[in-house]
């Protein structure tokens, strides 16, 4: 069944979209990468090339594999450019109305037998599927950041997702060399249901003055052996994405324990979204990151 997936489309060429394009092209799939502007896609292609080159330098892949992978990725700014893909993975911003609009425009031109997936971190797959013309061929394929390095991909079936779609998605993920964890369709699935409340709590710890940025991150890196401190990780994920996930948890589970920290809201309102805007809990504009609190 999964042999049918030869060509994939990726919508949104940010940090996750370019990572998905990178691993799929390395695995031998043809990739069409879509974003709203040509500048965005150009910068994504440069990032992919940089990350592939690092893998060559570390002897993880060969120079030939880098060239071949790059040659398999084409870019498009239109939905028509995705029309003959076997699988399209949406990885645009974590905003339900934007994703719905993308699925509406995509399904109008995409071949009927193609599978549509979302890389959403938190939003109901059943609800997103219901906004398409093919809920039975819709699934959550949730990659982890950074995509080329993280082993896990969560698969989330919506209420209508059929077995053929699930099997094809599982085979696709396995072909990329990733491990699958199956999650039921509840807010933020498994990883983010556990990880994001921890990050939100770290932000409350900062907000309440229990520790400063450096102390909180050092505490969790050295005291709990986390590879990144929670505030460093929040900046890495993107504070807008962190806030959206907490909002989905708060609204979807109606429990005050998921209340987004007001300090997180303030950073997002300031446009301090973390690494992608060069400022978040750290300021990345200098030689090394400097805590902002
Ligand atoms: C929000 C969601 O919906 C779900 C999520 O994804 S939640 C986030 C999940 N991810 C995490 O928790 C990540 C936690 N952090 C880590 O595991 C590690 O810090 C890490 C794997 C990111 C980096 O590991 P590290 O040992 O510190 O290595 P580091 O020296 O920074 O990088 C090692 C190599 O990784 C690669 N790498 C690092 N960042 C990368 C990136 N963003 N993209 C691609 N490759 C990257 C590079 O090849 C790098 O090699 P160089 O040293 O030559 O540059
Ligand atoms: N960050 C993370 O750690 C993880 C994120 N995710 C999920 O992946 C998705 C993407 O996140 P991430 O890559 O971090 O976000 P980024 O902000 O890095 O990238 C999002 C990209 O989508 C583009 N975009 C916005 N609207 C559209 C549109 N209508 N059509 C096409 N492209 C569009 C943005 O362009 P512009 O900037 O010009 O608006 C941007 O290039 C989200 O759903 C997120 O929750 C999943 C796992 C981990």
Image (tube, helix red, strand yellow):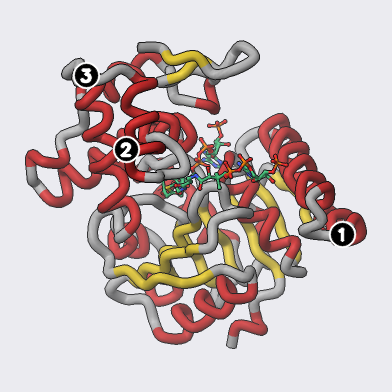
Q: Which residue is at a point 68% across and 62% down the rendered structure image?
A: 24
Looking at marks 2 and 3 on the same chain, the residue that comes earlier in the sequence is marked by 3
Q: Position of residue 9 (x, y in %)?
A: 64, 59
In the displayed structure image, the side of residue 225 where residue 276 appears, left or right: right
Estimate the spatial distance between the alpha carbons at disc 2 and disc 3, rounded to whole Å: 19 Å
Q: How far from the left and from the top, in percent, is residue 115?
A: 52, 71
| Local secondary structure at mark 1 | loop
Q: Which mark is on residue 244? A: 2
Q: Quadrant of ligand 1?
A: top right
User: Can residue 236 be seen in the rendering of this structure?
Assistant: yes
Image vertical order of residue 50 relative to residue 130, above or below: above
From the image, tell me which residue sits under label 1.
62
Q: Earlier in the sequence, mark 1 or mark 2?
A: 1
Mark 1–mark 2 Cα distance, whole angstroms, equals 38 Å
Q: Is mark 2 within 8 Å of ligand 2?
A: yes
Residue at the image position 51 percent from the left and 53 percent from the top:
90
């Amino acid at each position: 069944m999964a042999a049918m997936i030869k060509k994939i489309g990726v919508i949104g060429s940010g940090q996750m979209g370019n990572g998905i394009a990178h691993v799929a092209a390395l695995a031998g799939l043809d990739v069409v990468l879509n974003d709203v502007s040509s500048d965005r896609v150009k910068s994504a292609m440069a990032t992919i090339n940089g990350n592939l080159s690092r893998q060559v330098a570390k002897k993880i892949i060969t120079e030939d594999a880098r060239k071949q992978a790059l040659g398999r990725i084409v870019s498009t700014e239109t939905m028509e450019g995705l029309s003959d893909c076997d699988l399209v993975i949406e990885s645009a911003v974590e905003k339900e109305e934007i994703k719905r609009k993308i699925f509406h425009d995509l399904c109008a031109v995409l071949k009927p037998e193609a599978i549509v997936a979302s890389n959403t971190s938190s939003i109901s797959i059943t609800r997103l599927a219901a906004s398409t013309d093919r809920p039975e061929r819709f699934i959550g394929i949730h990659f982890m950041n950074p995509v080329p390095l993280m082993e896990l991909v969560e698969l989330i079936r919506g209420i209508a997702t059929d077995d053929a779609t699930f099997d094809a998605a599982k085979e696709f993920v396995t072909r990329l060399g990733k491990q699958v964890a199956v999650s039921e369709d509840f807010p933020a699935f498994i990883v983010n249901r556990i990880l994001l409340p921890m990050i939100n709590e770290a932000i409350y710890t900062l907000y309440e003055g229990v520790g400063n940025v450096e102390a909180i991150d050092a505490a969790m890196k050295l005291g709990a052996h986390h590879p990144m401190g929670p505030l460093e990780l929040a900046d890495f994920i993107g504070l807008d994405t962190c806030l959206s996930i907490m909002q989905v948890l708060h609204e979807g589970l109606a429990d005050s324990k998921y209340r987004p920290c007001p300090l997180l809201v303030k950073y997002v309102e300031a446009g301090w979204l973390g690494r992608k805007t060069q400022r978040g809990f750290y300021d990345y504009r200098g030689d090394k990151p400097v805590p902002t609190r």
